Structures are given as C-alpha cells and as structure tokens.
Amino acid sequence: DQQVKQNSPSLSVQEGRISILNCDYTNSMFDYFLWYKKYPAEGPTFLISISSIKDKNEDGRFTVFLNKSAKHLSLHIVPSQPGDSAVYFCAASVGGETSGSRLTFGEGTQLTVNP
Amino acid sequence: ETGVTQTPRHLVMGMTNKKSLKCEQHLGHNAMYWYKQSAKKPLELMFVYNFKEQTENNSVPSRFSPECPNSSHLFLHLHTLQPEDSALYLCASRRGGNEKLFFGSGTQLSVL
C-alpha cells in the first residue's frame, strides 16, 4: 500500500513559466511534508517543507501548498529555470517536524525545464 | 557537498561476491539510514541506526547486513545478491528528532 503517490512521472515546462508538481497521500496521520530534489549521480537534497498547521510555505521561487481535506500537496516553482531540471520527491511523516519518525517517499517526478 | 560521503560510487558484482558499501557523515548526526532506490519506485527504507543501535530493519533479506561501528560510520555488507538487487543505495543521516535527512550521493550497484 503506497501511502504517498506522485502520479506524474515526468513534467516538461518552458523556462520562465510555472512548474507545478503534485503529490497525494492516503494516511490522514501524516502531519509533516517535505520535498526533496535529486540531480543525476547525486543524493536527494532537502528543498522545502510544510507542517499540517499551515496551508502554504514559501521560500524564494518555491512554494508548497497543502490541502488537508483533499490529502494533496503541490510544489510550485516560479519562474522555472533550466537548473531546476531534476527529480522531485515528495515525503511525509507522522508526529511533526521533531518527532524523528520515518519518512515515506513518493516515486518522484522528473522535471525538465527547457530553455 | 551534503556532509555525507558514500563509497564506492559505482559497484559491479557477481552473485557470489562479497562486497561492502561505506558511508561516513561529518555532520555530528546521531541517526543513520540505508535506503534503496529502484527505477521509478519510491525510496525504500532498509535500516535505521540511532546512536549506533539498529532501531529498524524494514524486512530486508539477510543477504544485506548493516554495521554501524560509531555514529559517524555506516556499512552495508553484501553477500550472494540477486540481479533484482541492482539499484541505487543511499545513505542518509539526521540530527536527533529533526526530520530533515541529509543524503549521500549513493552507490549505483549492478549485480550480474
């Protein structure tokens, strides 16, 4: 039973436009969500997170939106840049930011930003 | 550079070989992890160590044997693997209860 799903394996956008990556989850106990970015031949790196007490968190060009009723979160990148081309993983956990509980990851979405 | 170093970066081994993957973290973290990433699949948690003690084994076959001699080093010993074990093996570390994992670059393993 996959509790975190990223239904789009790939996404292609033009430079300067908005990229929207989506993630759905089934476990209503999840209360902390993260996005990781992974370049080829490198490990994933933390990008942005959001707690379930919020519905939006913004960091520069990156904004994560959380819709708890729909069990859906999305990552918006605007404007998109070619250097954003990478695989993006959504992850979720129970118990908040400091609980130390395990992260459950989605399958990843390959984002390609075309110049 | 994330502060988590994995060696080797690439490994090709036969099914009867014994090899080891090494991970070292320079971040002063207390928890270390092994993850497996197969193509188009989620990252699969394999093992968790907290303060050198194994706290989680996610039903991993015994042909994978982890070792954590101290909080900075983690090994994954491989023995009689199968071709389906070919994947990217990622080490990660975390400071206490903080959820942010720091990953190494991984070892791309091919089992022939």
Image (cartoon, coloured by chain):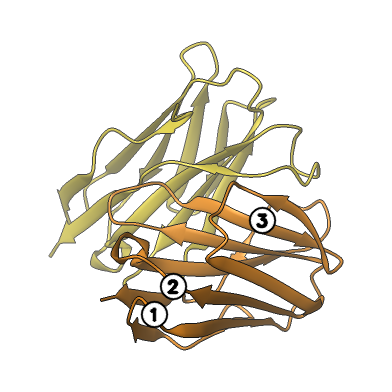
Chain colours: A yellow, B orange
In the displayed structure, B69 sits above or below A113; it is: below
In the displayed structure, A98 sits above or below B46; it is: above
Can you see residue A41? no
Q: Is residue A98 left or right of residue B35?
A: right
Q: Residues within 10 Å of mark 2 (few under 14, many from 20)?
A: some
Front-most of residues B83 and B104: B83
Residue at the image point whose x is 34% and y is 57% from the top: B38
**Distance from the alpha carbon under mark 1 to that under mark 3:** 37 Å
Contact, CB < 8 Å: mark 2 with mark 3? no
Residue at the disc numbered 3: B100
Q: Amino acid at mark 1?
A: Thr
User: Label 3 is found on which chain of the structure?
Assistant: B
Can you see residue A1? yes
Same subunit, tags 2 and 1: yes
- Residue A57 in percent (x, y) is at 57, 39
Q: Quarter of the image containing the N terminus of chain A?
A: top left
Q: Of discs 2 and 3, which sits in the foreground?
A: 2
Q: Is residue A101 left or right of residue B8?
A: right
Front-most of residues A63 and B17: B17
Residue at the disc numbered 1: B16
Tag 1's secondary structure?
A: loop
Q: Quadrant of residue A55?
A: top right
Q: Amino acid at mark 3?
A: Lys
